[in-house]
Amino acid sequence: MKFRIQRFDPDRDAKPYFKEYDLEPGPSDRMLLDALVRIKAMDDSLSLRRSCREGVCGSDAMNINGKNGLACTTKLADLPNVVTLKPLAGLPIIRDLIVDMTLFFQQYHSVKPYVIDNDPMPERERLQSPAQRDELDGLYECILCACCSTSCPSFWWNPDKFVGPAGLLQAYRFIADSRDKATNERLDDLEDPYRLFRCHTIMNCVDVCPKGLNPTLAIGRIRELLVKRAV
Amino acid sequence: MSIPVRKFDAVIVGAGGSGMRASLELAQAGLRVAVLSKVFPTRSHTVAAQGGIGAALGNMGEDSWLWHMYDTVKGSDYLGDQDAIEFMCRMAPETVIELEHYGMPFDRNENGTIYQRPFGGHSANFGEKPVQRSSCAADRTGHAMLHTLYQRNVLAKTQFFVEWMALDLVRADDGQVLGVTALEMETGEIVMFHAKATLFATGGAGRIFASSTNAFINTGDGLGMAARAGIPLEDMEFWQFHPTGVAGAGVLITEGVRGEGGYLLNKDGERFMERYAPTMKDLASRDVVSRAMATEIKEGRGVGEHGDHVLLKLDHLGLETIDKRLPGIREIAMKFANVDPVKQPIPVVPTVHYQMGGIPTNFHGEVIVPASASQVVVPGFYAAGECGCASIHGANRLGTNSLTDLLVMGKSAGAAMIEYIRKSGNAHRELPATVGDFSRSRIARLDSQSGGEDVHEVRSEIQRTMQAHCGVFRFPDLLEQGVAKIKALTDRVARTQIGDKSKVFNTARVEALELDNLMETARATMVSALARQESRGAHDRADFHKRDDVNWLKHTLWFRDGDRLDYKPVHLKPLTVPTFEPKARVY
């Protein structure tokens, strides 16, 4: 197989360029990350993030033949013979496949990603019915890999103002939590031409999420709550 | 040459479960705390924990912390310190409730309480029958817990230094710990983090083995730093092989599968655990199940073309239970084993998973070292989580007790640090004049090394050696050869060379620095394993088949200098209850 990987080291390079690597995957090379680890053994200057290699830590998100995904859960067998790899779009490149995720995490932090409940806590756990808990399914599983937000044209244009699909999915995760007491404040914060309403339901986020989550649906739910609140 | 210095009340190395539980304690107390992590906090390896958190909440029926304590002592094959075990099991329910109060999305029962599932080695009434003690969020408990802890730290305004790698521990002449030097990956800058109290929460070093459930980042950095600074490592011969890693891929399949009713089959379709553990069957402790699986494979009853694995059957649980309780497992099986567990069994094999040993501490997380005839605290130094050894897990950890350990020991270490910092006054102790020189010399050597060793090759050689010479079953000749090979590899590690000389996010440099830490951990493991002439918990010697309480009911201490070994007694006396006297382990 041929791997065309976008390279850039600000110490050395004036601009990004593509470097090609030929590699025949061995029998134990199942995933794209396996191939990248072998390429790095040949050329240790290739920089990428990786950790759990099973799709739960969210480190190795990248653009794979034009579509964002995790290298560790992308099967080599599902890829064509020529694989083009680029860093996630819309965020500054630090080096090679590593992008600066500061803006992405700032947006995540901006939604106050924690249960707000200022009442004194009971001695035991707060009760939550299985149905109430089910409301969190499809939301809490997010791994903050940024595949979604960096495939969203609205986020590319306004990463400093638009919360983006990942942040909004988490905003709704706390709105949907029966233990959270700050729904109104959360809706106030999102009722803004940029923070929420830059979503134009392009749905790239749904298409690329490696965990099969649906940020567009969550954004729709937030919109519904805003409408309900207005009438 | 002077090094930039940043001052904090506390520095925590590692942003997994124990590091972030401790930082929360410190930040909430209004102290200035810096948390250093090689990866963004939610990418720490705690994220991969699946099955649950052990705590006697009693939500599903009668349970008690004393039963949990008995199970943990028995699970440890009586090598666990019973004061630390009592402490953990008593504190467990309150720390789990606290986590719920932080917003953890636990699964729930019809009455709204936290759902708990059965797990290996956890029993009611001192071994009578399995008990439901594992609080979980489907099979993503570690992910849910790590994100919850990060979220609470955001609220508490903890200061994170993300993608900083700690390099070396800095000590005063009298041994007091003054902080760490660390490398900012993005810029290549080296900074001294000067602290009144320093906590290592760096996790395990499962990457010393070729086949491991562990993440790439699990390179034993805390162990390497401690060893280089003259701190011994405790009980490093004890490594847990998790029964169910995906064959060929190493990825973890939670014991929760068996907790929910799944079981293991050999090539004859026999549920073989009934022969090895008549009461607990597939829910016996992990060392017992892994040994049983390895025996089945060794005796020709393994499955597959090479007869090298067994099968984990769960299709009888039905689609609904699997999608509700084990959705992540289904995803992993489909991606990494090409089977849908709703229809087909998953091929599994015992896989290195957890390091029971580590930096010696008491149950306050204070690091303890030998001095003349007793054990003394190293002032200003703490360790918690997988890199610490309290010793709660002894020779074998029970499933779910790792997350319990992270919460209880993280909180306990945080509290001890607060007390120590408040007593120590406002001033930081002066740093030695040579601070940073050693770390800089390590980087300088890497930058200038020519004609040296390839990092990837040397690392692979360490991993192959550990796998072949220090596995589920351990043989004297293989261990002896293993010690010689590992010692020879130490010289090669000292001459590693990298091609990448860039200052910006130089991951080749990071991997070379990690290799130094893997090396120390591997050597500690192999040397300690050769010396221990008995079989206990996860350490199974072909030449010493039985546990030997007369000669070996004691903790190993390995010192880096000269690979010296020392031993210290097990704390058999709990805090308030009578001792659980060592007896034969039957499940």
Image (cartoon, rainbow, N blue to C red):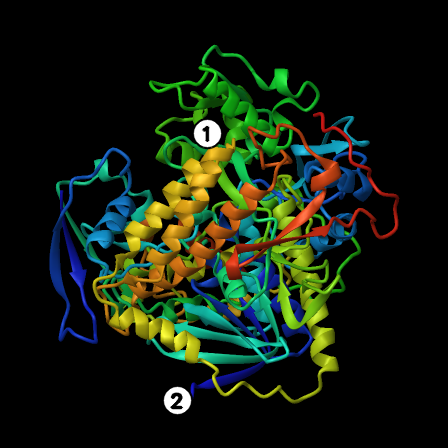
Report the side of B19 relative to A203 (left or right).
right
Q: CA distance from mark 1 to mark 2?
A: 52 Å
Numbered label tally: 2
In the picture as drawn, the residue positioned furthest to the top comes out as: B268
Residue at the image position 29 percent from the left and 47 percent from the top: A33
Q: Position of residue B88 (x, y in %)?
A: 73, 51
Q: Amino acid at mark 2?
A: Met
Of B107 and B517, the residue lying toward us: B517
Disc nearest the viewer among 1 and 2? 2
Residue B336 lies in quadrant: top left
Residue wearing tag 2? B1
Q: Is residue A132 above or below residue A58?
A: above
Quarter holding residue B375: bottom right
Residue type at mark 1 is Val
The crowd level at tag 2 (other Cα within 10 Å; few <14, some 14-19, many 20+) is few
* Quadrant showing the N terminus of chain B: bottom left
Q: Measured along the vertical axis of the image, is residue A46 above or below residue B75?
A: below
Residue B125: x percent and y percent? 82, 31
Residue B347 in picture, x, y percent from top left: 42, 25
Q: Is residue B382 left or right of residue A101?
A: right
Mark 2, secondary structure of its residue: loop
Q: Quadrant of the C terminus of chain B?
A: top right
The answer to which of B391 and B483 lies nearer the viewer is: B483
Q: Residue at x 74, y 74 (%)?
A: B419
Which residue is the site of mark 1?
Answer: B349
State the residue at coordinates (51%, 34%).
Answer: B476
